Image: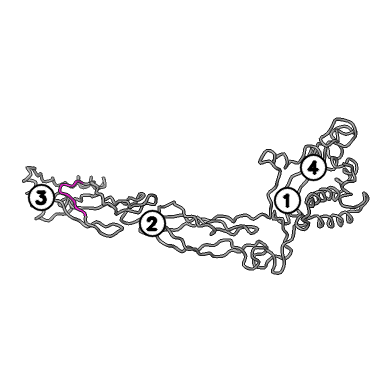
Amino acid sequence: MNNTEFYDRLGVSKDASQDEIKKAYRKMSKKYHPDINKEPGAEEKYKEVQEAYETLSDEQKRAAYDQYGAAGSNGGFGGGAGGFGGFDGAGFGANGGFGGAGGFGGFDGAGGFGGFEDIFSSFFGGGGGMRNPNAPRQGDDLQYRVNLSFEEAVFGVKKEVAYNRESTCSTCSGTGAKSGTSPVTCSRCHGSGVINVDTQTPLGMMRRQVTCDVCHGTGKEIKEPCHTCHGTGHERKTHKVSVKIPAGVETGQQIRLQGQGEAGFNGGPYGDLFVIINVLPSKQFERNGSTIYYNMNISFVQAALGDTVEVPTVHGDVEMTIPAGTQTGKTFRLKGKGAPKLRGGGQGDQHVTVNIVTPTKLNDAQVEALKNFAAAGGDKVVNPKKKGFFNKMKDAFDGE
């Protein structure tokens, strides 16, 4: 490449002023812009115009280009003839050392080692392509925690939930532009969403890509923002949705509602809403999966003689037989009186654990009856000794 090619790309002379270069650049970039010119090779021409203007619009780079060509303007390995063969045919340079104006080779692709972004792209994903900032992107997902009563979780329920989310602006339909106007290609990054920033280091000029500070990575510039969303394309709204919660859910389980999250970008779809279940505790029951647990107190007479009792369940009261001689801690199973099984179908069971309660106060007739019961069984009943004053004080301090 000779050191007049960049001028030829813009159609200006080598002694053109900055205003002439800028005017020529605007004309040529508009002519070959991919959004306007769909002819084969137009995109490549557009990139060449960008490269030429990026060098010639900077006085320091332009001076280096005029002296050394493309390798010099980009901080490559010098521009002299002879010397050690370089990476762009430039060599180490006749002036000694590592090249001309830029010192050690820059990382931007025109000379020297090639672009930093090229190095990283070759290691991390290959291809060197950048994400299109104007491509449709799905919106963010949201979470909503819903509280259910114990019975609602067992039988299922339909809930209407309301929450705030980013929705597509109703005024501009998501464009971000005022009614009657449209976003235009960013004048700074020319639609790429990123700009090159050069930094002078002891090793020479280093180049890195950063998000465009004008369009913030969108590649589009909004001259007249929408008065509702102020150019974001989104507005915060309260959104309501009906959630059908299946029978048998438990705390921590999630229900995904597709498209009920936040609005997408560049026409992309809405994100999803994840409804997280939280089951409130019951005053009567406990639950593990499809099995429900219930603790029931019975008297020692019922335990000894047996009885038929009414047991509460989530399905209503049912009769349960307690056989004679039941011991405390005994567990009975009520088949099919538990919660539905989420997977595989069917119904769980309810487990009823009995606890024999010893009476704390007895009347004379009860005391006499129990003594007769003991005597009939051959048990010797010893009346407990009455405690003295000091024993009572000791029990009080011991918390008895």
Give neighbour class at mark 2: few <14, some 14-19, many 20+ (Cα, 10 Å). Answer: some
Residue under label 4? 200
Of helix, strand and loop, which one carries label 3?
A: helix
Of helix, strand and loop, which one carries label 4?
A: strand
The amino acid type found where label 3 is placed reads Leu
Give neighbour class at mark 4: few <14, some 14-19, many 20+ (Cα, 10 Å). Answer: few
Label 1 – label 3 distance at C-alpha:
93 Å
Residue under label 3? 370
Q: In the rendered image of this protein, does residue 201 appear above or below residue 144?
A: above
Q: Are marks 4 and 1 in contact (CB under 8 Å)?
A: no
Q: Magenta segment: does it hold 271?
A: no
- Residue 51, how many percent across, how many down? 81, 48
Residue under label 1? 194
Residue under label 2? 247
Q: Earlier in the sequence, mark 1 or mark 3?
A: 1
Label 2 – label 3 distance at C-alpha:
50 Å
Q: Earlier in the sequence, mark 3 or mark 4?
A: 4
The amino acid type found where label 1 is placed reads Val
